[in-house]
């Protein structure tokens, strides 16, 4: 029988397939390999942290209990602190003059015991501002593990489908690898070899070969991840990194507590709740997933997590999971100042449709929501206009800033609660510490679970007692940052998108049309009546939340008129504002006054004068009234509070209005920053060059001018006489 291939071709084909099998088999173990590497890297990180602490403890501490150890001899021999002793063996210590084997054993035992106690307190805290070799090893290992997982499952699947066929064909082709010996191969085996050759060749040039090449190339690319790529990955997917670390090394993240304050029996039931997050575009932290399951399991609850823990994300996740179980209609009720923010967050973090039911189009929007479903986003005031047919129900009502309906007699409270009765699930949300106002808490709980409200009515004086917390646990759940995010960076930044009122929009558009572009940048703050300013409304809420959270606030603006508007708005809450006309001594006097002021106090400041050269650690909330032309200006301002000596996480809020120059400037700066990140170095001087110059701003305003003229159907400027 004539052969259709040479022995060399047969060997080459077998070698290629064997290479595939080896690579794919090795890839199957990639997740286990890098799981171990992550654990090792974290252990090394922790050990280095232990050594850093031990290095600060002088060797003389060994004699604190007057044990009579010859510490001078140890110090003379180079053992000047507990770190050097921790690294030494008993034999090395006993070689020191005057140190016996028994004493060396006791020294090592004492040092190891101290090291163990330090190690139990070590918490992993990764930061792109502290990229040391130990953190970098962890970040690189996690990045490879994270990005390699998708290939691992595909490799397993490919091997499962083809391993037997490939190995059988390789065995069948083996006679074809012989040159002279081919003559002595039986006719049957020659036919089998030809069949095997064709089969292997077909696999190599078909889908199997293409998939194998793609997977192997992908894995090799992941394995080549360097420290720069790894840190970039971390900066973009921080939550996913910490989720992996929580899973592999929970003891170093303070994540060994898996119930976060819930009664154990309730927590065990909640953890069994199935969730389907298909359509959620973000990753939940472990505590957020537990919050989600709590919301779904309990049905009608009050989530009181501290500011910055992602109550909004947990609410969106709950709606996504319910949608995936067949639910169609959801309703978010919130203050007007955060309506735009809710719509953005829903669209950004899920595939749910967000429908604004507010303003002039509320009737048609409500009709659309009733007929087609999705997430209706409305305000407390607009609830008065909801006309729903008898028998209409919906899956979930989310009530944000729920303390707005603490007064049961208020019309907005009645309207909101009336709507909530039509919802299968109800979620009240507030970051205000309700334990400080038990009557307010009971009022909200009564709208959710009246029986529990009745139980705690007689327990008002026990608001901080375990019995009280145990009783309200089925309806009220609150986590604090320090309890659930041991690794939380010290800086949490938020874009607060505000929807303009008609009055604000009229003033803003007139400023643009008259080409008073500086005035246009003061959008919302130059409304004739600050009660009709969306940014002012949001600032009031931030200040209220901050005061409830025992925080102080700095408010920055480029414009002196805006600083004055803030002072008028907040009145006695403000200390004297800082502006460019003050001498340094007076500025420091104001800082001292602010330091001594109570929680909820506000320091207004022009960003170009109050944003540099000051230490204001007593503030932990920073509000920036409008986007600046240089990110470095904002960063320097934030650094007044975010610096050494700050004991709390710093929360930054950027107040922005949709469909205004705020949006254009913010997007332009993000694009500039993206280009810089891709191509420039990380020097301060280079970062300082990311700014919007007059020409770029002029282009922004010309586009804004055209947009407004087109909207008005008019090519001539409209003069607003009231400005």
Image: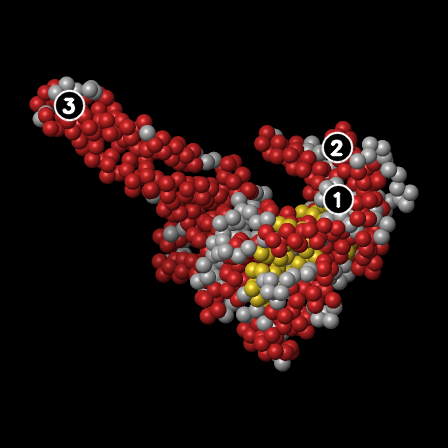
Image quadrant occupied by the N terminus: top left
- Give the distance between the C-alpha atoms of the residues marked 2 and 3, in whole angstroms: 75 Å
Q: Residue under circle 3?
A: 178
- Residue 703 marker: 2
In the image, 105 versus 493, the foreground residue is 493
Earlier sequence position, callout 2 versus callout 3: 3
Please state the horizontal and vertical placement of residue 545, each as a whole percent of the image: 70, 60
- Give the distance between the C-alpha atoms of the residues marked 3 and 1, in whole angstroms: 78 Å
Which residue appears farthest toward the bottom when viewing the image? 458
Label 2 neighbour load within 10 Å: few <14, some 14-19, many 20+? some
Please state the horizontal and vertical placement of residue 293, each as a whole percent of the image: 50, 61
Above or below — where is 286 with respect to 691?
Answer: below
- Residue occupying image coordinates x 41% and y 34%: 218
Label 1 neighbour load within 10 Å: few <14, some 14-19, many 20+? many
Tag 2's secondary structure? helix
In the image, 344 versus 331, the foreground residue is 331
Above or below — where is 418 with respect to 364?
Answer: below
Q: How many marks?
A: 3
- Residue 626 marker: 1
């Amino acid at each position: 029988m004539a052969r259709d291939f040479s022995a060399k071709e047969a060997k080459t084909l077998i070698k290629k397939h064997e290479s595939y099998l080896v690579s794919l088999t090795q890839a199957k173990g990639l997740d286990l390999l890098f799981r171990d590497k992550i654990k090792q890297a974290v252990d090394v990180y922790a050990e280095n942290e232990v050594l850093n602490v031990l290095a600060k403890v002088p060797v003389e501490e060994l004699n604190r209990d007057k044990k009579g150890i010859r510490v001078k001899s140890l110090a003379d021999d180079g053992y000047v602190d507990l770190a050097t002793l921790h690294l030494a063996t008993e034999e090395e210590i006993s070689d020191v003059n005057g140190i016996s084997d028994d004493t060396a054993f006791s020294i090592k035992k004492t040092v190891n015991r101290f090291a163990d106690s330090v190690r139990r307190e070590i918490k992993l805290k990764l930061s792109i501002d502290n990229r040391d070799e130990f953190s970098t090893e962890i970040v690189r290992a996690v990045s490879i593990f994270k990005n390699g997982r998708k290939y691992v499952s595909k490799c397993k699947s490919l091997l499962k489908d083809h391993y037997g066929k490939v190995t059988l064909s390789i065995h069948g082709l083996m006679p074809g690898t012989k040159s002279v010996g081919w003559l002595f191969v039986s006719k049957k085996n020659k036919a089998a070899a030809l069949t095997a050759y064709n089969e292997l060749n077909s696999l190599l040039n078909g889908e199997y070969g293409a998939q194998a090449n793609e997977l192997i190339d992908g894995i090799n690319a992941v394995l080549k991840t360097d420290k720069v790529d790894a840190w970039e990955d971390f900066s973009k997917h921080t939550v996913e990194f910490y989720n992996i670390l929580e899973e592999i090394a929970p003891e170093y993240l303070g994540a060994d507590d898996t119930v976060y304050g819930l009664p154990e029996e309730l927590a065990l039931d909640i953890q069994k709740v199935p969730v389907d997050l298909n359509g959620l575009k973000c990753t939940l932290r472990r505590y957020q997933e537990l919050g989600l399951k709590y919301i779904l399991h309990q049905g009608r609850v009050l989530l009181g997590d501290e500011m910055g823990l992602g109550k909004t994300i947990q609410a969106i996740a709950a709606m996504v999971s319910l949608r995936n179980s067949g639910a169609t209609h959801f309703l978010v009720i919130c203050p007007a100042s955060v309506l735009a923010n809710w719509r953005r967050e829903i669209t950004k973090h899920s595939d749910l449709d967000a429908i604004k039911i507010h303003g002039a189009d509320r009737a048609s929007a409500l009709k659309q929501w009733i007929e087609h479903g999705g997430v209706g986003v409305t305000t407390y005031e607009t609830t008065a206009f909801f006309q729903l047919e008898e028998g209409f129900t919906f899956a979930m009502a989310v009530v944000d800033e729920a303390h707005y309906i603490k007064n049961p007699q208020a019309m907005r409270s009645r309207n909101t609660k009336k709507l909530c009765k039509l919802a299968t699930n109800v979620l009240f949300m507030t970051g205000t510490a309700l334990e400080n106002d038990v009557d307010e808490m009971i009022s909200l709980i009564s709208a959710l679970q009246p029986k529990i409200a009745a139980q705690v009515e007689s327990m008002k004086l026990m608001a901080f007692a375990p019995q009280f917390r145990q009783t309200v646990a089925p309806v009220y759940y609150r986590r604090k940052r320090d309890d659930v995010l041991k690794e939380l960076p010290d800086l949490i930044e938020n874009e607060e998108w505000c929807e303009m009122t008609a009055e604000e929009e009229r003033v803003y558009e007139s400023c643009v049309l008259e080409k008073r572009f500086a005035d246009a940048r003061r959008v919302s703050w130059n409304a004739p009546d600050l009660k009709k300013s969306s940014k002012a409304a949001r600032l009031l809420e931030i200040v209220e939340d901050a005061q409830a959270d025992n925080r102080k606030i700095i408010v920055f603006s480029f414009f002196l008129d805006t600083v004055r508007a803030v002072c008028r708005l907040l009145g006695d809450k403000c200390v004297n504002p800082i502006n460019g006309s003050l001498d340094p001594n007076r500025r420091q006097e104001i800082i001292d006054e602010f330091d001594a002021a109570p929680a909820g106090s506000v320091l207004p400041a022009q960003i170009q004068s109050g944003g540099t050269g000051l230490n204001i650690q007593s503030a932990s909330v920073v509000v920036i009234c409008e986007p600046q032309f240089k990110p470095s200006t904002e960063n320097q301002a934030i650094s007044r509070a975010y610096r050494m000596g700050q004991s709390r996480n710093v929360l930054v809020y950027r107040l922005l209005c949709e469909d205004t120059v705020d949006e254009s400037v913010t997007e332009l700066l993000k694009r500039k920053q993206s280009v810089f990140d891709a191509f420039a170095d990380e020097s301060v001087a280079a970062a300082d060059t990311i700014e919007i110059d007059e020409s770029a701003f002029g282009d922004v305003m010309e586009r804004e001018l055209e947009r407004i003229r087109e909207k008005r159907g008019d090519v001539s400027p409209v003069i607003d006489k009231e400005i």
